[in-house]
Amino acid sequence: MTSRTWCWITAGAVLLSAGVVLLSGWSRSGPTVKGEVLLDGTPLESGSIRFVPGDTKLGPDAGAAIKDGQYKIDKGLRVGEYRVEIRSPRRIPGKTRGDPISNVQVPAEEEAIPRQYNANSELFRKVVSGANTFDFPLEGK
């Protein structure tokens, strides 16, 4: 190849790289959600929160861990209506169960959060563009 051909190839590569950088800078990130989860007025020590889209066009669900009552979801959400599920398994003192995979006895657990906040969730939130804050003051069993 001639030096002129290499010049054109190099110039094309530079322009292509610049275009990729500009386009990635213009892409908008989706909405974010953060908040606090309280159980009977106390911050939930640990657990998980999941936003399940009411419309399949919104894509898959998104969630995060809850630690000391706080959660934050930075990715995976779109603008729309979501059903919210909150879970927090806790150990049952003195009880074990057989693990079906390893056949070893492991501590038994139960859900600390009532079903109306997870399996039969009655919690719904509308996620809008930008930053959203949703706090969940839950009442226990």
Image: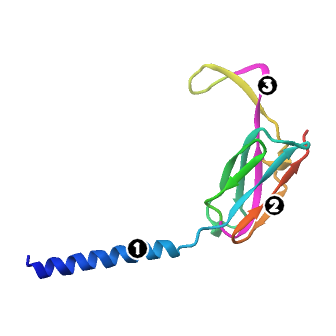
Amino acid type at mark 2: Phe
* Residue 89, magenta (yes or no): yes
Question: Which residue corresponds to mark 1?
Answer: 20
Structural distance between the alpha carbons of marks 1 and 2: 38 Å
Mark 1 or mark 2: name the one nearer the start of the chain.
Answer: 1
Q: Separation of disc 3 and disc 1 at Cα?
A: 54 Å
Q: Secondary structure at mark 1?
A: helix
**Element type at mark 3:** strand
Pointer 3 local density, CA inside 10 Å: few below 14, some 14–19, many at least 20: few
Identified at 63% across, 69% down, the residue is 57
Which of the labelled discs sits on residue 92, or is there none?
A: 3
Closer to the camera: disc 3 or disc 1?
1
Circle 2 sits on which residue? 124
Left/right of residue 4 with respect to residue 118 in the rendered view: left
Q: Quadrant of residue 40?
A: top right
Using the image as rendered, state which of residue 85 and residue 104 is in the foreground: 85
Residue 70, percent from left and from top: 75, 48
Residue type, label 3: Ile
> What range of the chain is rendered magenta?
78-97
Give x and y (percent) for residue 68.
76, 41
Q: Secondary structure at mark 2?
A: strand
- As drawn, is 88 to the left or to the right of 9? right
Quadrant of res 78:
bottom right
Describe the colour scheme in one phrase: rainbow
